[in-house]
Amino acid sequence: MRFNATACLSAWVISASSVFAQAAPQFTARPAPEHIYDGGWEHFVGGGLASLDCNGDALPDLVAAGGSNPAQLLVNTTTGPGAPLQFESQTPDALSQVGLTGVYPLDIDGDSQLDLVLLRVGPDQILRGLGNCQFESMTNIGFESADHWTTAFSATWEPGQSLPTLAFGTYVDRNDPTGPFESCDATLLYRPDGDRYRPAEQLTPGFCALSMLFTNWQRSASGRADLRVSNDRHYYVRGGQEQMWEMTTPPRLYQPEDGWASYHLWGMGIASRDMNGDGFSDVYLTSMGDQKFQLFDPAVGGPAYRDVTYDYGTTAHRPASGGDGRPSTGWHADFGDVNNDGRDDIFVSKGNVEQMPDAAMRDPNTLLMQSADGRFTEIAETAGIATMHRSRGAVLRDLNGDGRLDLAVVNRRAPLEIFENTTAETGNWLAVGLSAQGPNTQAIGAFVEVDDGTRLHTREVTVGGGHAGGSAGDLHFGVGLADTLKVRVIWPGGKATNWQSVAPNQRITITP
């Protein structure tokens, strides 16, 4: 059967009908260490924010790119579960450097300490995690980067490898005298050879990538993840499009005959989540002008996604407050259930690139709350997060261990913001951590399934997406009124755990 948006929405409504309605979420601004993402043309984009637990205290810490300012590590010093959020700048020398556009946490060497991949204007870098929030340059894996303008990243573990495959998305080739328009640089793919990386393989054509994500879109038994790339039409101008690379040897671009539909937008960020309960990951794409929500269509048998933006009310194409009626510019996007009602919501950071006259200057962030009918409603202003800065990277995670998703946002030429979720009444929740044997200790490529009795919630464990930053750690599930849950993990390689019954409102760790 072919994809039918109306039928899908009806099924979605039925699956959510037993979940009770709750009050609108509320966030409270908390003091944050001084941090500003700044710089000239090369830092109009970027401004990524990452979260990871770098000291083992079960509280996510933050790493913020600074552009022309030094990057910072903000250690979470919150005093206990549910306590007001507190962070302190405790940046090690190896990280305190300028030129960063983004950062992603990833355990590259399989020692169970999270490392950091630094995206830069200049040579990209990898820092080895030493524990206790200390890092040093990782020089023994053969990774070599030239001088690029890097604005996107993703990683996957290919079968039988001791190191992850790394993809770096580069932006405009600054050395092209005919640029900047139609001078997009190539995507760089680093595949391992034993315990070292081969020289970078260029995936061409490149169309100015601003976000990319390895995903096992088809839930294949092999576990192979293909590389989706979101590109900026502002610079590729014509002849370009969104891309999906099949990770064969060598990789190849999916074509219309494979089910891949040509798609053009001013791509900024990718968020991925199974939103309709069919077990396959759907996507939300941010851009300059509007945002796109696409559901995966398994009937095609290829990487086919159908735009359902207007059906679900997720365009977010103009500012919802502030009085500026020009089009919005979206950057980082994230799915998350901010009131734990069992229905995922959507956060989008927004802000003008710099002074683009055709785009809104007063462009507050968006929070789209999913209703019981499956549609979404903008609530950022009433939730307390609709500030008017030029926002870039963001983190939507439970930062104080109380089961409610909090928010941190990096802003261009304005201070970083931290918002604590202080919603008075929320539904039940479950936090699931995975701990695997090396080399892939984070179980990248695994699928976690939580059955709440009315719906199966599915999460794919990935590294990448967003805009220039990502998170490592627990997977958060809002489960509404459910008081008994069943959980299982399909590990990379396809082996599944038995279903286990667990109570909500707790953090659990699952091992193979």
Image (cartoon, rainbow, N blue to C red):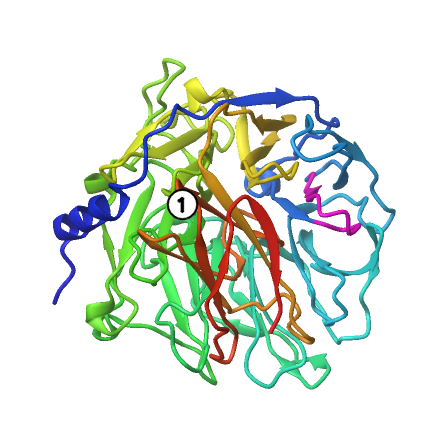
**Quadrant housing the N terminus:** bottom left
| Quadrant of the rendered image containing residue 485 | bottom left
Q: Is residue 76 left or right of residue 420?
A: right
Residue at 46 percent of width and 31 percent of height? 426
Q: Which residues are magenta?
A: 53-66
Residue at 21 percent of width and 43 percent of height? 13
The residue carrying pointer 1 sits among few (fewer than 14), some (14 to 19) or many (20 or more) residues within 10 Å by Cα, namely: many
Q: Amino acid at mark 1?
A: Ala
How many labels were placed on the picture? 1
Q: Which residue, as the protein is rendered here, is positioned at the far top?
A: 323
Residue at 41 percent of width and 31 percent of height? 367
**Is residue 236 found inside the magenta-colored segment of the image?**
no
**Is residue 57 found inside the magenta-colored segment of the image?**
yes
Position above or below: 381 against 224: above
Position above or below: 438 against 9: below
Q: Main secondary structure of the magenta part?
A: loop
Q: Which residue is mark 1?
A: 482
Q: Is residue 417 left or right of residue 186?
A: right
| Quadrant of the rendered image containing residue 319 | top left
- Residue 337 location, x and y as percent? 44, 40
- Residue 453 location, x and y as percent? 34, 53
